[in-house]
């Protein structure tokens, strides 16, 4: 971080040393671990927060799955960093790329070494934000920025599924369960029998999170969109490491769902459908990155089946083989394309077209066209996932004027007063109020998601929505302590203040903060863009802020039978990151509107 972008030798050498030491260290440790008969290692470390019924702590776990993933991650990252030194030579984002890759590598290691869901979720969250930054690396182009938002929207859905899995796990086990405890088959079997419906919900959330992370059907379309980043980041992120973390999650939780037949059938079905559909799509794509992406997705579909059948050694071999192959293919793809274009220029011979009207040829042509359109996955996801949220937000657009915002602020103040006199409120009114405040919080965040006229108004709507969400949980639960509320609100309000401050500063310079397009103000105001991004990341509760722990505590205090409340709050947190990063992307990223800057191609 402290070097200049022109100091390429220092930046690259420091990166080589860090990742090289990690590679040597994990190789030596794996040899020693195998020599010691491969014991399972579980270590409890730093405790973030502790109460009578809640303990949030770092836990690390090492077994054969960790051994394979950690060595593979260090090897691939080291090789890609060496390649990147030359590939990105004299690129304007040289330092930014190496910073992001190292943050990704940290997140990857935290995920694969995690000993409980909380530790895994920290790495999982960092992986999501590094994904956004790497896809939008060419931030002066339209499509990389747009596809970064598409990808992070699906990643956010996976994050929310993991949060719900954490919430359900807290109520099933009444503690923060470790992966070592999940290996206790008798304990797991008794809990499944006692809490069958809750366990099914928890496992469904884990399967959806794994499906999204590994780009399985119907969420496969984000992976080729993510290839808009540099080829080296595509190789390390989407070709070899991050895309296999869905398989890792299934391996890590295998003993939990091994004897739950519906979950096993669902995983095999998802894997089989993906393997067939992704193969068909890969065979007809016209771009090499898309072909490689869907080929990798098809292989991961087979890995899902292997995990469900219990063939875990084969799965790990398959992961290593697929990772190394896709890394190689992506790194050499620009050279191969050059050779093929040269060969085609001199030796192209058009094939003879044979027309046929048979039934089989019509079926074949139908599959060809459908695969060419990638089975319309983008269209279906947009209609099913995001359009309903936009529709609800537009229905309540009358609340976004100044008078309505003032009324919402006054109602919140009234809610805070009710919180202090909670003991004097009848139970039925109390139950209605906390649902009402949660619903208002959800509506406000959806309003921010569809707001186009003013970035400042969208930011204020986000702040109000989070205040209402916290109030809804505080009104419901008498055990929700002031320290826990402050833990979440402290960093939230600081980030909100910094965001408003920098937006106002930018407005004084450009006089227009609408969200109708991507305006690329990062060209003229890079420092404002950097600090506003930090405020955005703090606002969404990334693990370097206290609000991350506060979010976990908030969910812990929602009773497992409060389905309506958890739905409202979950939708709020699902849309929160999208709304915040949408403001950042539309204001600071994309092609600059000023004629003094060159206009980049729409795509990389």
Image (spheres, rainbow, N blue to C red):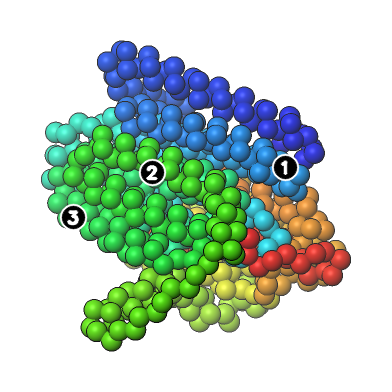
Secondary structure state at the residue bearing disc 3: helix
Q: Residues within 10 Å of mark 2 (few under 14, many from 20)?
A: many
Does residue 430 appear in this view?
no
Discs 1/3, front: 1
Q: In the image, is residue 339 above or below residue 70? A: below
CA distance for labels 2 and 1: 28 Å
Q: Pointer 1 and pointer 3: residues touching (CB < 8 Å)?
A: no
Q: Is residue 212 left or right of 193 when viewed as pictured?
A: right
Q: Residues within 10 Å of mark 3 (few under 14, many from 20)?
A: few
Dot 2 or dot 1, earlier in sequence = 1
Residue for badge 2: 322
Q: Tell me the number on the disc at residue 89.
A: 1
- The residue positioned 62% from the left and 24% from the top of the image is 17
Quadrant showing the N terminus: top right
Out of 82 and 305, give the one closest to the viewer.
82
Q: Is residue 12 left or right of 477 when viewed as pictured?
A: right
- The residue positioned 34% from the left and 55% from the top of the image is 298
Quadrant showing the C terminus: bottom right
Residue for badge 3: 265
Q: Residues within 10 Å of mark 1 (few under 14, many from 20)?
A: few
Dot 1 or dot 3, earlier in sequence = 1
CA distance for labels 2 and 3: 24 Å
- The residue positioned 50% from the left and 58% from the top of the image is 288
Q: In the image, is residue 184 above or below residue 556? A: above
- The residue positioned 29% from the left and 19% from the top of the image is 38
Residue 569, percent across and down? Answer: 43, 60
Residue 244, percent across and down? Answer: 39, 45
Secondary structure state at the residue bearing disc 1: loop
Secondary structure state at the residue bearing disc 2: helix
CA distance for labels 1 and 3: 48 Å
């Amino acid at each position: 971080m402290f070097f200049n972008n022109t100091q390429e030798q220092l930046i690259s050498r420091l990166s080589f040393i860090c990742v090289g030491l990690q590679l040597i260290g994990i190789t030596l440790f794996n040899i020693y671990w195998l020599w010691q008969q491969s014991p399972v290692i579980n270590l409890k470390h730093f405790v973030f927060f502790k109460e009578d019924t809640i303990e949030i702590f770092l836990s690390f776990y090492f077994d054969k799955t960790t051994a394979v993933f950690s060595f593979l991650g260090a090897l691939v990252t080291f090789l890609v960093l060496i390649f990147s030194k030359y590939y990105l030579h004299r690129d304007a984002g040289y330092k930014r790329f190496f910073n992001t890759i190292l943050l990704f590598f940290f997140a990857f290691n935290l995920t694969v070494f995690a000993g409980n869901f909380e530790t895994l979720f920290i790495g999982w969250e960092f992986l999501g934000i590094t994904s956004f930054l790497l896809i939008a690396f060419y931030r002066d182009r339209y499509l990389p920025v747009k596809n970064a938002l598409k990808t992070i929207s699906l990643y956010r859905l996976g994050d929310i599924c993991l949060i719900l899995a954490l919430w359900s796990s807290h109520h099933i086990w009444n503690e923060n369960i470790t992966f070592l405890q999940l290996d206790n088959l008798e304990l797991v079997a008794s809990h499944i029998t006692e809490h069958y419906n809750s366990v099914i919900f928890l496992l469904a959330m884990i399967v959806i999170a794994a499906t999204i992370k590994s780009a399985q059907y119907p969420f496969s379309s984000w992976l080729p969109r993510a290839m808009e980043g540099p080829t080296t980041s595509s190789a390390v992120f989407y070709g070899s490491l991050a895309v296999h973390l869905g398989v890792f999650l299934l391996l890590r939780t295998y003993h939990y769902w091994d004897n739950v037949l519906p979950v096993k059938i669902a995983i095999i079905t998802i894997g089989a459908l993906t393997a067939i559909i992704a193969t068909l799509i890969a065979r007809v794509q016209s771009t090499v990155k898309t072909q490689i992406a869907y080929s990798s997705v098809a292989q991961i579909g087979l890995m899902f089946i292997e995990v469900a059948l219990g063939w875990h050694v084969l799965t790990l071999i398959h992961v290593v083989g697929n990772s190394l192959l896709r890394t190689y293919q992506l790194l050499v793809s620009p050279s191969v394309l050059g050779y093929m274009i040269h060969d085609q220029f001199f030796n192209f011979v058009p094939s003879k077209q044979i027309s046929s009207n048979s039934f089989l040829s019509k079926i074949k042509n139908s599959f060809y066209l459908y695969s060419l359109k990638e089975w319309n996955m983008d269209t279906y996801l947009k209609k099913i996932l995001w359009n309903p949220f936009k529709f609800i937000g537009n229905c309540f657009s009358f609340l976004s004027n100044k008078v309505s915002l003032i009324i919402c602020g006054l109602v919140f103040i009234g809610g805070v007063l009710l919180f202090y006199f909670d003991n004097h409120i009848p139970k039925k009114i109390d139950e209605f109020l906390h649902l009402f405040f949660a619903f208002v919080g959800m509506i406000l965040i959806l309003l921010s998601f569809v707001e186009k006229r003013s970035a400042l108004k969208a930011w204020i709507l986000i702040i109000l929505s989070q205040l209402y969400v916290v109030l809804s949980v505080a009104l419901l639960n008498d055990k929700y302590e002031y320290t826990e509320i402050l833990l979440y609100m402290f960093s939230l309000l600081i980030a909100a203040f910094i965001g408003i401050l920098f937006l106002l500063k930018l407005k004084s310079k450009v006089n227009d903060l609408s969200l109708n397009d991507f305006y690329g103000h990062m060209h003229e105001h890079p420092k404002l863009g950097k600090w506003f991004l930090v405020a955005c990341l703090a606002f969404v509760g990334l693990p370097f802020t206290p609000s991350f722990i506060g979010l976990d505590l908030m969910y812990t205090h929602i009773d497992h039978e409060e389905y309506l409340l958890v739905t409202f709050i979950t939708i709020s947190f699902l849309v929160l990151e999208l709304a915040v990063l949408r403001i950042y992307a539309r204001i600071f990223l994309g092609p600059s509107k000023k004629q003094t800057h060159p206009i980049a191609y729409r795509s990389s």
